[in-house]
Image (tube, helix red, strand yellow):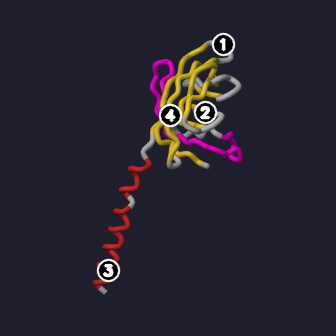
Amino acid sequence: MKKIVIICGLVLILLSCSKDSDKSNDSWSFTWTHENVVHMATGAAAYATQAGVGLGSNQIIATMGTSSQPRVSIQLSSLNPGSYPVSVNTNRFEYIDDAGNDLRGATGTVTISTNSGNKLSGDFSVKLIDPSSDTTIITGSFVDINLHP
């Protein structure tokens, strides 16, 4: 009986320790600066073909806090590495600012630097426009965010 307890205890220890090393592979970041305020996403992902879940294909999103509403939404013509010129009609960029205003990308570039192993990395610099035609700049980067098929 003592041997069974010892063996069960060792198995439990081995199983609980083996998962810790896997957590380092889930390291990602998505940060941006708008009007001199640096923001850090609490959730981010890219979707290749997820139109059925309310997102378009080739879409990158970032959320903050407990809200599921994306603060940053980028919909590109492709998620392959390369530079994508932003406009209000193609390679769309949408941003909800700190006041809750919906801003759209007028010009700028989103660059996908790597798309490998279901992870996506890149950066962006976009001139945003609001409904009153006022403009501001947003810059940022994302590293190793999950890419869903």
**Residue 143 in picture, x, y percent from top left:** 46, 38
Determine whether, in the image, residue 118 is placed left or right of residue 50. Answer: left
Q: Are marks 1 and 2 in contact (CB under 8 Å)?
A: no
Determine whether, in the image, residue 19 is placed left or right of residue 49. Answer: left
Q: Which residue is mark 3?
A: 5
Task: Give the residue displayed 64% in from the left and 34% down from the top.
Answer: 75
Q: Report the amino acid beneath label 1.
A: Ser
Sequence order check, earlier mark of 4 and 3: 3
Residue 41 visible within the image: no
**Residue 77 in picture, x, y percent from top left:** 66, 34
Is 43 or 26 nearer to us in this picture? 26
Task: Give the residue displayed 70% in from the left and 44% down from the top.
Answer: 51
- Distance between the Cα atoms at labels 3 and 1? 71 Å
Q: Which residue is mark 1?
A: 133
Sequence order check, earlier mark of 3 and 2: 3
Q: Report the amino acid beneath label 4.
A: Gly
Is 78 or 20 nearer to us in this picture? 78
**Residue 98 in picture, x, y percent from top left:** 55, 25
Would residue 46 be counted in the magenta stretch?
yes
The stretch of residues the image draws in magenta is 31-57
Q: Which residue is mark 4?
A: 122
- Distance between the Cα atoms at labels 1 and 2? 20 Å
Residue 131's place in the image compared with 54, above or below, is above
- Identity of the residue furthest to the bottom in this view: 1
Image quadrant where residue 130 sits: top right
Q: Which residue is mark 2?
A: 73
Q: Residues within 10 Å of mark 3 (few under 14, many from 20)?
A: few
